[in-house]
Image: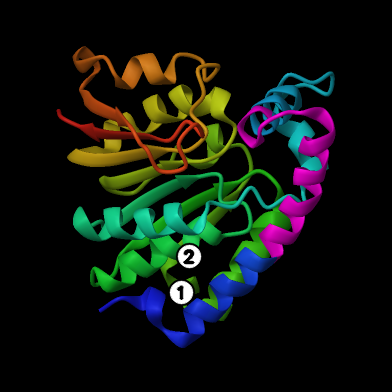
Amino acid sequence: MNSLQSQRLAGVLTQLFNEAEKGEAAIKEYLAKTGLSMDEAVRQMVTKAIQSEKGGIEKLNDRAEDYFAVSRDFGKFLYATARACKAKRIVEFGTSMGVSTIHLAAAIKDNGGGEVIGTEFVASKAARARASLEAAGLADLVDIRVGDARQTLRDIDGEIDMVLLDGAFTQYLEILKLLEPKLKPGAVILAENAFKEADGYIAYIHDPANGYIAQTLPINEGRGNEFAVRTM
């Protein structure tokens, strides 16, 4: 069984990817003018937002209409990884419009049930994600929590099989440490845009003394995609 192939779910994903690509067209025009790569632009934008004069990640409210969607290939990889580790409980930091969430929830469904716990700082994005999940027939498998992830993810009921970090990358290490007590041995942690500026996250997961085995992924190479498995 592969729910991604269902007509209903595939239709929702196609619409979301098409909308995301329209948004990327404006970004590509900006890149052509500035000479920046997509990776450099994402890195600069998120870093400036987090470190802005407004303070904290509140600045990200200004980017409420930006998708920050995973690519089609990375979405399929998320689904395959969740199926492979037979995930029943997945935590997602950075739900955005729900593209990645749909892939994760589809895997949960095909694994026989469970839940995706998502968190999103921007309320309007969380609302759009919920609507897309409803349209895809997956809403009953997802709990999207609105607010600062350092608060919304403090209360996790049960062990975690998989984590996706795809929010403000300077918080990845803090969020990982928050979730560590709930991670099952063998739990998979995927991080997108885990750049070197991510406050020690990469060094932490690549140090075996911290209880992980990690590998930089070639998918969307250059985007800072990191794969780690909890070994203890």
Task: Estimate the x, y position of residue 162 in percent, counting from the top left.
Answer: 31, 46
Drawn side of residue 208 relative to residue 25, left or right: left
Res 17 → quadrant? bottom right
**Secondary structure found at label 2:** helix
Task: Estimate the x, y position of residue 138 in percent, counting from the top left.
Answer: 46, 74
Q: Quadrant of the N terminus?
A: bottom left
Q: Nearer the viewer, residue 191 or 157?
A: 191
Task: Estimate the x, y position of residue 85 in percent, counting from the top left.
Answer: 20, 53
| Mark 1 Cα shell of 10 Å, populated few (<14), some (14-19), many (≥20) | many
Drawn side of residue 99 relative to residue 216, left or right: right
Magenta stretch? 19-40
Is residue 37 magenta-colored?
yes
Q: Nearer the viewer, residue 171 or 215?
A: 215
Q: Residue furthest bottom?
A: 7
Q: Give the residue at mark 2.
A: 102
Task: Estimate the x, y position of residue 89 in percent, counting from the top left.
Answer: 31, 54
Q: Give the residue at mark 1.
A: 138
| Amino acid at pointer 1 | Leu
**Secondary structure found at label 1:** loop
